[in-house]
Amino acid sequence: MSKTTAQPIEEQKLPRYRQRHYCPICIGQRLIDRYKMIAKLGFGAYSTVWMARDESANTYASIKVFVQDERADSPVTNELNVLRKLKECPSDHFAASGARLPSEFFQVEGPSGRHHCIASEPKGCSLWDLQDVFPGRRMPHQLVANIVRGLLGCINWLYLDCDLTHTEITSQNVLADLSNDEPFAMIEREEAAEPSVPIMDGDYPVYHFGSARTASVAQTDWCMPDTYRAPEVLLCVPWGCQIDVWSIGMMALQLIEARNLFNPIDYAHSQYVLPVAVAQYISVLGSPPMWMIQESRNPDIRALFDDQGRWTSEVPIPKFSLEDWVTAIPDGQDKEDFLRFIRRVLVWEGLERGTSTDLFAEEWTTSGLR
């Protein structure tokens, strides 16, 4: 964790900060006469996250304090509803523990009104931050295989037992677990000696559920992080739980290679460039099925192709070889196993993609168990 001196409050720099009504929290403050705030762990568009001492249980806790937002369709309301649902789902699935669930829901009053809060068991840094430990931010593929295997099991539970699609599985939304509380005790000691604001980049929960959707209902909205977006979402056709498998594949590539397979961002203007995105996807996946073009709800997608499904945009389709792009795994059986795994993910149609059950048993996915 990096440290900054306790000067500006980071979330105040976010767009529309004032409209979002963050709850002001001070280190040393006690919430509901139980949680003493020790250090700030991070912030996002709709919450701040703190490490606290649970004085009732004499242990540490992570406290997520949401912005004041009671709208029925807000990410805050959605996440709270999803978490309450998950708490009621069957927990006998072997991978149910992969979802980080709150130990307590509570509320606090702030200047703008009531703020919902959740307390959870604290975890370590995000996988995104963990990459800094490794040379060139490239994680060993055997370690990534273990992570992927756990995530595949978890989304299997989310889909089968909870009827949920996550939609935002990324390296920033998955945390490394810790074997003991010593890192938290160290933060507490350092905070007492020299007040500061430890910041953990990215979203703190193992799974950020603010954008989760019902899995059994065909969805049509635009979603997912730009560099992880599944092709069925990109082409604006109905999508389902298969997009989580796609996200896990994108995350595996990013963790192993320390770069994104797709990056259609105009950083100079902070814009997602749709024709560039579609061209990049075609270079990797080949031409999309004709039905996806014809049934796209976005006329801008249909305008990129002629009546025969041929690419007509001025944006060139890049030349691409997956074998050449994957350089972190040496040539040999391990690389062949990984390429076979990832090719089962890299398909246009969600229903043609490998399922979480199938991919769980792939040779590469089990390589970390050897």
Image (cartoon, rainbow, N blue to C red):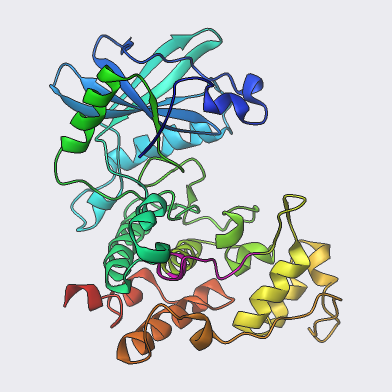
* Percent coordinates x, y for residue 246 in the rendering: 49, 67
* Percent coordinates x, y for residue 53 in the rendering: 22, 21
Q: Is residue 288 visible?
A: yes
Does residue 111 lie above or below 129 as drawn?
above
Taking depth in this image into account, of 131 and 61 the one nearest to the observer is 131
Relative horizontal placement of residue 228, taking residue 41 as reference (left or right): right
What's the residue at 74%, 81% (across, down)? 317
The magenta segment is 253-263
Relative horizontal placement of residue 84, taking residue 251 as reference (left or right): left
Taking depth in this image into account, of 226 and 242 the one nearest to the observer is 226
* Percent coordinates x, y for residue 267 in the rendering: 71, 54
What's the residue at 61%, 28% (across, down)? 13
Relative horizontal placement of residue 57, taking residue 318 as reference (left or right): left
What's the residue at 56%, 58% (across, down)? 218
Does residue 260 belong to the magenta stretch? yes
Q: Is residue 237 visible?
A: no
What's the residue at 59%, 33% (across, down)? 73
